[in-house]
Amino acid sequence: MDLGKFIYQRKKKEREARRAQAKIEVKEIRLRPKTSEHHLQFKVRDARRWLEKGNKVKVRIRFRGREIHYPEIAMESLKEVAEELSDVSIVEFQPSREGRSMLMILAPEKGEK
């Protein structure tokens, strides 16, 4: 077998495989524990749009100053966001603390896109 032909065909198959694969983006919304309800609704609406397109959404709540001593406020906000988006998403990564922020990842439901 011709080695040059073999390498060419292998590269061609790899190129086709790359073209066919789905690229999933991870979008992020950033909140604070004191984010107002109105502002939160804007962020949720953006997250819903991204999830319907098939992207994952990372919801991050950043703590400043003494806010870090009250993680239950942030946990309530994250649960509220997850509940509002439960019809178009599933919680892929449960809320957890990472340094001075709390993070949750939402993935689109299987039937979406």
Image (cartoon, rainbow, N blue to C red):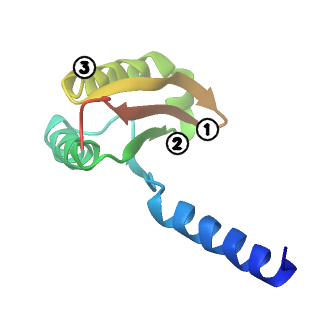
- SS under mark 3: helix
Q: Is residue 69 left or right of residue 58?
A: right
Whether pointer 1 and pointer 2 mark residues with C-beta atoms closer than 8 Å, the reply is: yes
Q: Which mark is residue 69?
A: none
Q: Is residue 58 left or right of residue 39?
A: right
**Type of amino acid under label 3:** Glu
Give the vertical position of 109 relative to 20 (above or below).
above
Q: Residue at x 24, y 44 (%)?
A: 113
Whether pointer 3 and pointer 1 mark residues with C-beta atoms closer than 8 Å, the reply is: no
- Density class for disc 3 (Cα within 10 Å; few <14, some 14-19, many ≥20) is few
Q: Which residue is mark 1?
A: 100
Q: Earlier in the sequence, mark 1 or mark 2?
A: 2
Residue occupying the far bottom of the picture: 4
Residue 34 in percent (x, y) is at 33, 35
Image quadrant in which you'd find residue 51: top left
Q: Which residue is mark 2?
A: 64
Q: Which residue is mark 3?
A: 83
Residue occupying the far front of the picture: 1
**Type of amino acid under label 1:** Arg
Question: Which of the two residues, 64 or 105, is positioned nearer the viewer here?
Answer: 105
Whether pointer 2 and pointer 3 mark residues with C-beta atoms closer than 8 Å, the reply is: no
- SS under mark 1: loop
- SS under mark 2: loop
Question: Which quadrant, please, contains the N terminus?
Answer: bottom right
